Amino acid sequence: MGAAAAAAAHAIPAVAQVIPAVALVWAALLKAQSLDAFGRTLKALGVPRLLAPSTAMAVVAAEFATGAGLLLIPASAWPRLLVCLLALAFAGAGLTAIARKRSIACSCLGAVGSHKLGRRQVALLPAWLAVAGLAQARPPDWTLQEGGLLLGFLLLSLIATQIYREIPLWRELHADRITIAVSIAQSTQSGKGGGDH
Amino acid sequence: MILTLASLALICAIGAVVFIQFGAMIEMFEQIRQMRIYLDMVDKPTVLDLGASQGRLASGAGLPANLDAVPRALVLFLSNKCETCRTLAAALDGGALPPHLWVVVVPVLSGDASQFLEDFRLYGDRILVDADHAITEAIGLDITPAAIAIEEGRMVEAHTVPTVRQLYASLPMVERKRALARKQVREADLVVVATPSDAR
């Protein structure tokens, strides 16, 4: 019973450290794929037109750095502090959308989904703070190398999700390529055949 | 320590770039798919209305009487002019037809389809020529390539056949596998021209 409790006391902060890391790295990479969409969200939130692209890049970089930092240097407090700051920024964006009574595309995960900014971001604030607090209470003690391995595994897993999405599309297009090739070959053949007769 | 950090940064950068590249490819593939949908180049059969012929005995529409006795069969209607029909005929070229597949060649515009039969070496007792359009008119079918599914001797469903893959997909499962094995090709490779069904 005691061992189980000790294991749980060890595992819970580790999980609390990994969850925001996964969410932030994933969100950053998806946003990086459609920076324009995220830039439009920032403009709708009041960021000046000229600053929106660079702000979008800065947010993406901050999310990625925070996610990577959580995994690479678990003992350090600054990534968890950044999680709190980012969560406050997200909630602030949600509150701004609510206050302006405007429907603003979230672009939280780039072009994936069609959520709007609003209550969801505000409601998630306590969850972000809770996981950061939980991890801060007993920071995980894995090494930089182990953290690197975790980050590598995370990136590979995210790449795998892209491949999983891509393969059906690729198969369809591969079939199309053969379709077009067969079609061209047969058109050429029938054209030649017609000329012979 | 610095080397480790530099390696990790490099791995992160490569991972991020690979992820984004895959995302860009997905975007591109989806755009091509959208274009295919827009250009009506989707490998998807369209169900045709059999009207009064639905549930009718095959022989009642001028098809061979021995079709009335088969539990399941597919009757493929090809015209001698449409490009997709030629592609389908090319897939059957010279080989024995898959079991339970009948082919009705409907000559249009000119000729008696003999050139078509010769070009694609379509011979046998399951190849018919609807020279005077008696069969297609009796069924009310005015599109080729089309297929009619026969169950217990009755016509149950008609659909267009935009690709060779759809032809094989329309065959009963066991026959489809045998046909594919005989052709020594993969099912994915059997997709051929996906043009909108050519109207005769």
Image: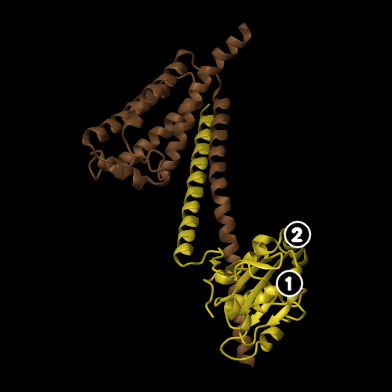
B73 vs B117: above or below = above
Q: Nearer the viewer, residue A7 or A66?
A: A7
User: Which amino acid is tagged 2?
Assistant: Val
Residue B58, label in figure: none
Q: Residues within 10 Å of mark 1 (few under 14, many from 20)?
A: many
User: Which one of the lettered chains is coloured yellow?
Assistant: B
User: Which one of the lettered chains is coloured brown?
Assistant: A
Rendering quarter of residue A170: bottom right
Rendering quarter of residue B124: bottom right
In what element is the residue under mark 1? helix
Rendering quarter of residue A109: top left
Q: Which residue is mark 1?
A: B67
Q: Residue at x 62, y 83 (%)?
A: B134
Label 1 and label 2 in one chain: yes
Q: Which residue is mark 2?
A: B174
Q: Residue at x 56, y 60 (%)?
A: A173
Horizontal side of B127 relative to A182 (left or right) equals right
